[in-house]
Image (cartoon, rainbow, N blue to C red):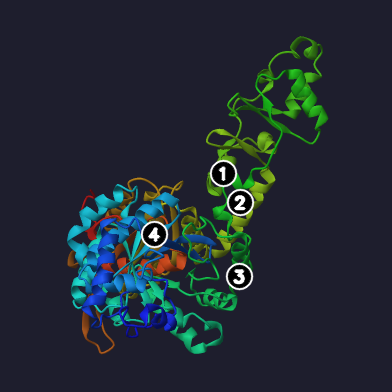
Amino acid sequence: MTTASFDPLRPEGPARQMRGWSRASRARVPAASPAPASALDGLAQGLRGLMAARGRDLGFLFQPIVDVEHGRILGYEALTRGPADSPLHSPLVLFEVAARCGQLVEFERIVVHAIALRFRELGLPGRLFINLSPDSVVAARGRTQAILDDIATLGLRASDIVIEVTETRPALAPESLRCAADALRQVGFAIALDDLGEGFSSLRRWVDMRPDYVKVDRHFVDGIAAEPLKQQFVRSILEMASTSGSTVIAEGVELEEDLRLLRRIGVVACQGYLLARPSASPRASLSMDVDAMLRAAVPLGESTDPACHALERTAGWFARPGLTVAQHETCAHAIDLFRSNPRVVAIPVLDAQQRPVGVLRSMQVLKRATHRYFVELCGASACTELMDTSPLVFDSSASLRTMSQAVASVDDEVLGDGYIVTTGGRFAGVGRMTDLLKAVADLEISSARHANPLTALPGNVPIDQHLESMLRQQVPFTAAYWDISNFKACNDVYGYQCGDDVIRLAARLLQQHMDPQLDFIGHIGGDDFVAVLTSPHWEQRITAVCRDFDTQLRALLRPEHIAAGGYVTKTRQGEPMFHALPTFCAGVLRVPPGRFPSARALAAAMVEPKQQAKRIQARSGYFIDRRGFGASAPHSADRTPD
């Protein structure tokens, strides 16, 4: 948005001045200029009335911010309006008057509470993006607990809210703004830098504040498909975001060709009229037209591997309608069902609450029916006499890996029965074993093709697929980016075979201490690994890996090097240089639902914690980035986690 001189009190009024403003819908506060005291008095009186009403006379619109890669709503930006019949209706006028009256911070507190209340009433999914001036952000530093208590009364958490720091007023104390943003982030709020490229000190604020989100001003988005210079600007922003761990949001998307270009260069979050207009009662999901447009606009280079989405498939994906029989039905009825449906090999038996209690198999039922006098003697008995009481049952949320491991232990003679799928314990459908085995085969072939040859652990492609799957499922997890520090010197001193043994040791320890049912381990390449943990006691597991690496590494090294804590090599100039022994370090990132729109964004955010972990000296350890969960801190292998 342009930061031209603006005076809501000039005689021609605000409407004429606003014609050159491209985004009048936002609550913005331009730099103040002198105004007649009499004109200000009338507007100030109106402002005092709005503040006395605690925001009840204000209007709020919500515009979706869309994850265009996965076709879902990330959150909503709140836009403020004054009363429709008032000269304070325009947000430009409204917040300018508050600033001139010295009431901006207090007024924004009222607005934030009212917005949060309305957001909760609407029951909208995702995060709430709220615009705040730098003044209000700085003022919030000493009130974090009061803010948390306030939003808790509305049923919201800090992690539900993203604070957008506006760019239309210069921050007179950048260090105070940075400290205030850090304090808010420590208690769970996310920070966004609004309108990048427009305001007073965009890039400096980015470097100082390290925001979670960066919103690119619409000037650089509108018409980007036809303007190479804008494309290069956004590519530069994406590269910086990859380093800082920020998610880029493109604002003002109004053309399909711009959306396609943005997706192709790597932008995964967009906002604009093309996707949804601001509304007082917005949709909780994307419209069918927008959903179809996003599905059709597949970026160039997207994988067509049949196993790409296999990890996301759960038992519910395989479920289909099937014949069932109530447990009170007779044996004669069950026999008739199989005779009438000769291609059906198994029928689930359900109780009165639609819960599976067993399965009838055609071979067994029809064989009993051929026994002499069976129908005459037992035809009226409950069919439960013919059923197997231990059917293969999966909850609809069961993963493909869980299902494949369970099937591996099933007797061959019952594989043809398929399996039962339940939701909340109640029957949801049946699954065919052939569909499951095909999906497992696709997954295994893909895993073998992309596995690391040294450790046989999944490589980059399966790692990305698993991370995308976890993000789509919207479940919290912990990601650990592992690295063997001082590895090159060890490889040079002991040779590549010993280097391979060190890498295998790291892989073995990760597999040993992680839960194979709940955790995922991947080998990026070289001495880098990734672990995705959903198991309990994850910090104890990481600590055990670090501790055992330091202990078991000794078997691969010479006693004199162990005693010295390292070895000496020569530089290219022939100068001696001491190298410490290898250590195994991890940058650990807690990942709450909705924080990252893609695996690319998550991978970029994992770089900094890993770099922090590598600063730990003398022993293996890890650094936890707890943004959204608590304070970040380094930990060495000899420390017992809390």
User: What residue is at 57 percent from the left and 76 percent from the top?
Assistant: 255
Question: Label 2, on which residue?
Answer: 440
Gap in angstroms between the C-alphas marked 2 and 4? 39 Å
Gap in angstroms between the C-alphas marked 4 and 3? 28 Å
Q: Which mark is residue 23?
A: none
Gap in angstroms between the C-alphas marked 3 and 2? 26 Å
Residue 327: quarter of image: top right
Q: What secondary structure is marked by label 2? A: helix
Quick one: label 1 or label 4, which is nearer the N terminus? Answer: 4
Q: Position of residue 385 (x, y in %)?
A: 67, 18
User: What residue is at 63 percent from the left and 35 percent from the top?
Assistant: 411
Q: Left or right of 350: which side holds 149?
A: left
Residue 626 visible = no
Quick one: label 1 or label 2, which is nearer the N terminus? Answer: 1
Disc 3 vs disc 2: which is toward the camera?
Answer: 3
Q: Position of residue 509 (x, y in %)?
A: 37, 54
Question: Label 4, on which residue?
Answer: 128
Question: Label 1, on which residue?
Answer: 403
86 and 476: which is toward the camera: 86
Badge 4 amino acid: Leu
The N terminus - image quarter: bottom left
Q: Are marks 1 and 2 in contact (CB under 8 Å)?
A: yes
Badge 1 amino acid: Met
Quick one: label 4 or label 3, which is nearer the N terminus? Answer: 4
Category of crowding for the residue at label 4, using alpha-carbon neighbours closer than 10 angstroms: few (below 14), some (14–19), many (at least 20) = many
Badge 3 amino acid: Val
